[in-house]
Structure formats: C-alpha cells, structure tokens
Image (cartoon, rainbow, N blue to C red):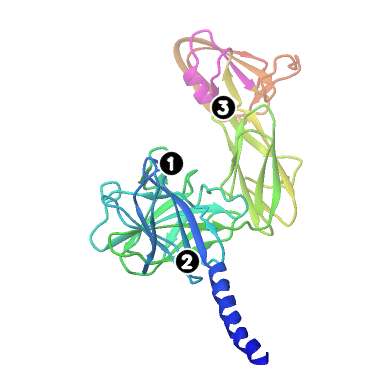
Amino acid sequence: MRSSVRSILPFMAIMLLVLSSICQAASITGTLNDRLKTPVSGALIEIDGAPAFSTLSNADGSFTISGIPLTPFRLKISKNGYLPVYTSTFLTTEELTISTYPYSLLTPAELPLLPGQGAVIVTVVDSISGLPLSNVRASKNNPMTQIMYLDASSGNFLAAEATDASGTFIAFIPANHAVELSANKYGYDINSYNATVPDGSVLETGLTLSHRPTHSLALQKSGSGNGSISSSSEDTCTQFPCIFSIIANSTAVITAVPNANSRFIGWVGSNCSGQENPCYIFMDSDKNASASFSLQPFTIEGTSRYFPSLVEAFSAVQQNEVILTQKSFASTGTSFNRPEITAVLRGGFDDGFNVTNRTSADYSTINAPLTISLGILIFDQIIIN
C-alpha cells in the first residue's frame, strides 16, 4: 500500500504543474483597421519571435491569440500592401484586451518612410479616464528623429505644436536605433517611452500621463469693457467666470488682455489686488483673481467704434458726428485738422458711456495743448486747462 502511494504522488505533482501552466497561459484580444477606420480582415497577427502563436483578423478586424506563455511579448501585424506594425511589449498573467486598440495599418503611400527609417505612433491618454489627451508636447533625445502630430479631422500627420483631440503624435526615427520619446502636458507628470523599430516598420503604442496635485484658480471680470485672462498653465478664460487648475506650490502667472474696444483698469478684490499686469500668484491653496476692464475712453456716438486716444477719434469722426469721452481719460496734446468737418466733443461719461448716470456736473478735463487747425469742433461739458 505504501509503494502505491509513493507512485501516485509524483504523477499527481506532474499533472498539477501541467494544469497550472495551462491555466496561467495568457490570451490577447484586439482589432485592426485602416487609415479610414475600416476594419482590416485577413491580416496576420503573431507573437514577434514566436510565429507558432498567431491568427488572422476576422471580417470585423477582431482577433484573439490564446495559450501565450507567461513571458514578455509583443505582437507583429502584417498584410500585403501595408507597412508591418509592431506593438509595445506586454507583461501579463491573464486575459488581456488592449485598450489602445484598434491598431491602424498604413500603406507605404500613406506613411512614406525613407530608407533606414521606421516610425513610432504614440497615443497619449489620461491615467484616470483613459481618454486621449490634447495639448501634449512631444520631445525626443535623438536629433535625427522628426516629430509630427495627427490631425484628427484629416487623418494626416502634420507639423504642429502639440496633440489635438486624438492625443496622437508620430516620430520618424532611424531604424533599429533606440530613441527616447517624452510626452509633456501642463498639470501632468512627464512620461517617456524607449522605442526601437525595424527598418520600414511602424511601432504603435500608448503612453499614460498621471495628474499632478493642483489647486483651483477662480477668475472673474468686472467693468464695462471686455477682455480675457491667459495663464502660464496655457489656459485662456474668455467667458467668465472660469476656473483654472494650477500645479500645487507653483507660481501662476496670469495676464489680462483687453479686447480691441477696451482697456485694462487693474486687478480688484482678489489675490492680485495691487499688482501690475501680469499678476503672480503662489498656489499653495485655492486662489482667485478678478480683472477690471473698461471701454476705451473715446467712441463715436451711435457706433461701435472705440478709440484709445483723441487723435485717433479726431481722425475718424465724420460730418456732424459726436465724439463721446470718458471722465477718466488721460489727455495728451493733439490737434483737430479736418477741413469742412463739423464735429462735437462731448465729455463727462463714465467708463461704460452710460447716459443715464451722467449729470450736468460731470466733465472731462483736457490738461494738454489742443490745437484747432481746420474744421469746426464744438465742446460740450469739456474743461480745458
């Protein structure tokens, strides 16, 4: 009886090892399409260096490879008429559905590669949502590498400053040379990918960026004028109120930019109060800023034309038109030289040229020389010193 037990135990151990290895084999599922996002069928998908693990894509572009040994692997995808595509290396101990799918097959005409050149296509995604990230800037450590960005509307790779909504850029690199590609977006940690691509091939991969801690910067606008506020976080606020996310314990530099019909008066009632333009705010907590804009100090009554100076208003006024001026304008020396033109210069208005609030005691003051050369200029509620 004892010898019988001894003979069964080794057999059972062997069976457990076999079953364990079968249960722990990996599988991978994904889909393929072409540049126009049409499914590609009949493409060969294989484990690079282990062609025994392979399959063909189905009519809908989908595929599954099962029984993959638990070792790092990458896929090679090929079909006549297309450039061969490699994936990044996968490390898995279970079934894997690749979130960066579908992979795209491109023809040599769609992606012309020079002799001795390969390409790396990188889609940058948010670590939390998994969605592609726009405004990502790519860089490389090899001067022979050229970076371009996918234009989602056309499907072409173009020279640009950063990714669009597709979150995708491409690097043309020397074949079989290791190149480090980095992705950088404000508010995220920089992440890098080391790539090596065979000659005439494409490597497609995803790159995840993680959020850095941030504080909120709330922005407001006041006054009769209009403008925007831009930030060193590469955001611009045009419709108020709005909130920027600023990296914690960094200095936000915000700049008030008045519209063409307005001027910047100053920062009011906020963490920027008393500062010049731009304003600097150290973001050790949530902060706020409010910019005041007024309309430019001169306008022609009944029109939407505004002017920063009297000389420009004088140059634009036509027969029998009225120039309205604010009480707060900074006067400079000028002359009215408009032959055969009669115009009125009417003062005493607030920053919004509000007629209702204007009283007989409201005047505008000119403290610099004003010369009437030709034409007729009529003064109304103007003090000339």
Quarter of the rendering occupied by the C terminus: top right
Q: Earlier in the sequence, mark 2 or mark 1?
A: 2
- Residue at the front extreme, as displayed: 1
Of the numbered discs 3 and 1, the one sitting upstream in the chain is 1
Q: Are marks 2 and 1 in contact (CB under 8 Å)?
A: no
In 3D space, how far apart are the residues under numbered discs 2 and 3 (Cα atoms)?
67 Å
Question: Along the line of sight, which residue is nearer the eye, 304 or 122?
Answer: 122
Q: Which residue is mark 1?
A: 152
State the separation of the CA atoms marked 3 and 1: 35 Å
Q: Residue at x 66, y 49 (%)?
A: 245
Which residue is depicted at the point 60% across and 81% down? 13
- Which mark is nearer the camera, 2 or 3? 2
- Measured in 3D between alpha carbons, the distance from the residue under mark 2 to the one under mark 1, in whole angstroms, is 35 Å
Is residue 277 left or right of 335 when viewed as pictured? right
Residue 123 is left or right of residue 275, and the answer is: left
Q: Amino acid at mark 2?
A: Ile
Q: Earlier in the sequence, mark 2 or mark 3?
A: 2
Q: Residue tagged by mark 2? A: 68
The amino acid pointed to by label 1 is Ala
Measured as percent of width and height from the top left, residue 186 is found at: 57, 53
Q: Which mark is residue 261?
A: 3
| Position in image of residue 96 (x %, y %) | 53, 58
Tell me which segment is drawn in magenta: 302-325
18 up-or-down from 115: above or below: below
The amino acid type found where label 3 is placed reads Asn
